[in-house]
Image: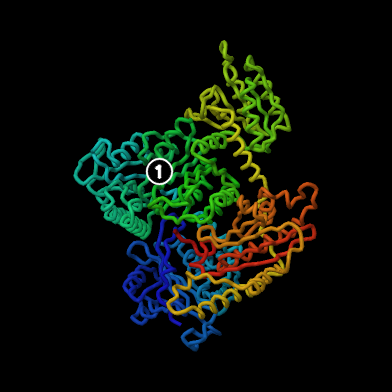
Amino acid sequence: MTEGYPDQWEADVVLSDGGTAHLRPIRTGDAGLLRDFYARLSPESIYYRFFSPRPYLSDRDVEHFTGVDHDRRVALIATIGEEMVAVVRYDRVNGGQADGDQADGDRPETAEVAFLVEDAHQGRGLGPVLLEHIAAAARERGVRRFVASVLPDNRRMTRVFREAGYRAEQRFEEGVIELVLDLEPTETSVEVMTAREHRAESRSIQRLLFPGSVAVIGASRAEHSVGRTVLRNLLAGDFTGPVYPVHPTAVAVAGVRAYPSVLEIPDDVDLAVVAVRADAVHEVVEECASKGVRGLIVVSSGFGEIGDDGRARQEELVRLARAYGMRVVGPNCLGIANTDEGVRLNATLAPTMPGRGPVGFFSQSGALGIAILQRTAERGLGLSTFVSAGNRADVSGNDLMQYWEEDPATKAVLLYLESLGNPRKFARLAQRLGRRKPIVAVKSGRSTQGVPIGHAARALTLPDHAVSALFEQAGVIRVEDLSELFDVAQVLAYQPLPAGDRIAIIDNSNSLGLLAQDEAVALGLDVRPRIDLGPRAGGDDYEAALAGALADETVDAVVALFTPPTIGGYDVRVPKKIMRLAARGEKPIVATYLGKEGMPADLRVTGPDGMPAAGSVPSYPSPEDAVRALAYVIRYAQWRQRPAGRIPELDGVDRDRARALVADWLTAADAAREPGAGDASDQVVDVSPGRAAELLACYGIDVAGGEDGGGVPTRIVIREDHSFGAVISFGIADETAALLDDRAYRLSPLADVAAAEMIRAIRTAPLLLGHRGAEPVNLAALEELLLRASRLGYDLPEVARLELSPVMADASGVMVRHVTLSLARPLGPRPELGPRRLS
């Protein structure tokens, strides 16, 4: 069977050193690339591949290596720029015979695999990433096992196979190590792939944030031009490396020697800020590629945000940059900044840059970026790093989360998001990062779930409250607006996390104290007896009350409220007394101090650079703001304290039969489709209740049918979302719950803890827990049903929608009364199941 060119196998990938490469199937026209590649190989690399000297490739060799059918013989190459730098291929084998000796109808499930990586690019992670992609292609074509023959002293290649995480067998015959790899993904192989992706993407961002030198291309002599502004900010920020203005005619810009082209700069250039017309960017990128620039910040506009022509220009920009190993921030962005003393990088258009601090900030909006940085500085909040991605054609918030997870300078992460390019990956990364560092996010577009023009992302199809639920599952603190974003960040950056939700309120004004108490009760916090010190309270009074609250084992956090009395002055020692106790870092303290907002100097533990340090107390204009910020932090701390849970192994599950049933039903539907009825991938196939019950039985779920046998009617829905993958929802199956849209949402597959949380997350949960003396339902049985249904949805991406309703739940157990099922062919493998690739 000969297949057409599989363009779905093309991919841009990040290598272990942070650079990029392009992967694609080999073509017959690649003969010249292959010969040039082979000519650059060392004799040792050639010997390791062919087990004998082979100084050149014959015409027959070239024809053989480029002549593939993308099924029996498959080869993928990696290119950087115009050069081929690596190749991997498989040839089907059966019983020791080469596949060419097999009958046409026989497609063996075993293939021999081999790599070859150019010496200059060895050690960059090309072997592992090529193995991931060739394995995915093999599985798509029905190959289940790879056989690899490796010389014993070729330790680098042996490591590639052994460390991939697949189930492997090894034997030693006639001086050669033969490895047999089972290509079914394992928990270990997925963990290995995820860890490599994390390291590579983190490294690619580190290269952008820690450049040794910067070129500003388009550095105009016009005072308020974009290029001149970036250049001025770089110089004013005291960047530690050389800065090179690039201008076609000027000898100098802003007093710094200029060059007519980046190619004329005599030294290396790590980072280029591009501020030229959109139609000139392509040429600039090519020059940067020739110069060996590692990364680009494109502040120029005129790309995806202006329509189809601009979007095509934007896609070409990213394609070209990645092909030459460069990541791109932007286009149409504000820029990036790093306050680390070793680099002091302000490659932005912002006139105000906050000082050094423990917060990493990612903003998609370039237009809002200047306001965000100004408000950050006004509040006295310090940043570690800042990235404005603009149209987010390449570098995204996901990339920054990979970096911040390992960055010791970042204690908390702030995100302003207008779209989610890969929501499922975002949830995975956030859940991992959130266990170590808090993430606070503003997600705009609540009313539309749309994507701004120019952004390289699709609109979300889930309702906004479902997106919020999935954020919550991942531990993300989703706030309503930018004000709340900063309110919460102030606590997370400088105060410890609370152990629980019990708060003490200390005040010198009854009205302020009552406002704080009412807000706390409304938010579900446990308020200890309020301490009203009265209007004449001084520093000693606050010190005693605060010390008592901090020593009280029934108090987890403190809200300190202070307003000056209406007559006379006030004791200026109050903030000092508060600060002395807050500096211990025992429990979080928030304040409303003289109506000030941010990190006031009176409540600040000052670091060596004058910025707030750990123990500084955040202040809010109103008691409600202070309590609300603290409540967000308390809920996050409670999420972090809960066990992450595990995805349990379920007995009575027959995945192979389930997959076979689905494949047979879709094949039959394709055969029955009328000619000209459209692409099969666009068709939804409704499955009869009887067949749906047969599929459910593969996952240990029985469908009883019949009339209502009593209990509480519930509803479970699995749907395949193009952004989030398999999503499961749960709720009560009645009209009131439907009108209120009272459903809990989670990503599949569910962990045991998540299944228990889902049931209790809906507002009508008391009906299941024993409302007004009723007998509680069998929660364990309901949780198990959720686990089995979610596993089915995760294993079978062809399940477009599965609804179990009603599911009757009572004290004895659960009973599925009715099921509806729709199938559709997926557009491709889910991102988390496929090999690593850039979107």
Label 1: element kind:
strand
At x 54%, y 72%, the residue is 685
- Tell me which amino acid carries mark 1: Ile
Residue 306 higher or lower than 253, as above or below: below
> Pointer 1: what residue?
336
Q: Nearer the viewer, residue 650 or 758?
A: 758
Judged left or right of residue 149, residue 391 is left
Q: Nearer the viewer, residue 398 or 365?
A: 365
At x 66%, y 27%, the residue is 505
Residue 710 higher or lower than 251, as above or below: below
Q: Is residue 390 visible?
A: yes
Name, please, the residue furthest toward the left. 249
Residue 587 higher or lower than 541, as above or below: below
Residue 248 higher or lower than 836, as above or below: above
Query: Which of the 4 image quadrants contains residue 175?
Result: bottom right
The picture places residue 779, in percent across and down from the top left corner, at 74, 55
Query: Which of the 4 image quadrants contains residue 344?
Result: top left
Q: Nearer the viewer, residue 645 or 88?
A: 645
